[in-house]
């Protein structure tokens, strides 16, 4: 069973709405598989321990330092990892797999910032 939670953005005034929306949409497409850092064939396995031995989601968020990112998606992967998709303040997209027992990063992938062209001026 796979848990997926939508996360409310918390960058505040650090990014413009249009730019943030473009990055958010791109990250969602990226995490869905169109430009995913980990291919479906690359199943990342973190643990075989029972979930009763896992740290809580809140503890995992602290280990990942989720407050430092615009956290877009959190889920439990097929390989029993806590999986995070996030955007750094500089615009880089981060995909992270944490071992839910130890909290150690099993894989951390960064994609460079997405250069989005400015929206064309709208006639009045």
Image: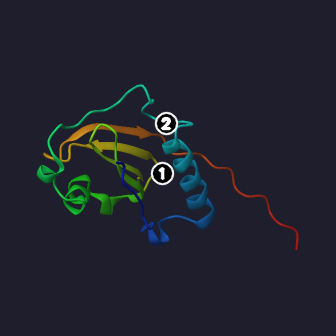
Residue 86 shown left or right of residue 33 in the figure: left
Residue 24 has which mark?
none
> Residue 57: image x %, image y %?
25, 59
Placement of the C terminus among the 4 image quadrants: bottom right
Residue in the image at 41% along x and 52% along y: 86
Q: Which residue is mark 2?
A: 36
Which structural element holds mark 2? loop
89 w.r.t. 98: above or below: below
Q: How many numbered discs?
A: 2
Residue 8 shown left or right of residue 99 in the figure: right
Of all residues, the one furthest to the bottom in this rendering is 124
> Residue 54: image x %, image y %?
16, 51
In this view, the residue in front, 22 or 100, is: 100
- Display coloring: rainbow
Residue in the image at 45% along x and 29% along y: 39
Q: Quadrant of residue 105?
A: top left
> Residue 12: image x %, image y %?
46, 72
Front position among marks 2 and 1? 2
In this view, the residue in front, 75 or 19, is: 75
Q: Which residue is mark 1?
A: 91
> Residue 114: image x %, image y %?
56, 45
Q: Quadrant of residue 63?
A: bottom left
Residue in the image at 26% along x and 53% along y: 64
């Amino acid at each position: 069973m796979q848990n997926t939670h939508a996360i409310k953005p918390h960058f505040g005034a650090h990014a413009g709405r249009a730019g943030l929306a473009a990055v958010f949409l791109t990250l969602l497409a990226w995490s869905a598989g169109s430009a995913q850092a980990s291919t479906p064939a690359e199943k990342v396995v973190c643990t075989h321990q029972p979930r009763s031995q896992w740290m809580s989601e809140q503890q995992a968020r602290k280990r990942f330092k989720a407050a430092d990112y615009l956290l877009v998606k959190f889920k439990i992967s097929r390989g029993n990892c806590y999986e995070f998709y996030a955007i750094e303040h500089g615009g880089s997209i981060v995909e992270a797999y944490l071992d839910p027992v130890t909290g150690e990063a099993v894989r951390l992938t960064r994609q460079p910032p997405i250069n989005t062209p400015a929206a064309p001026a709208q006639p009045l």
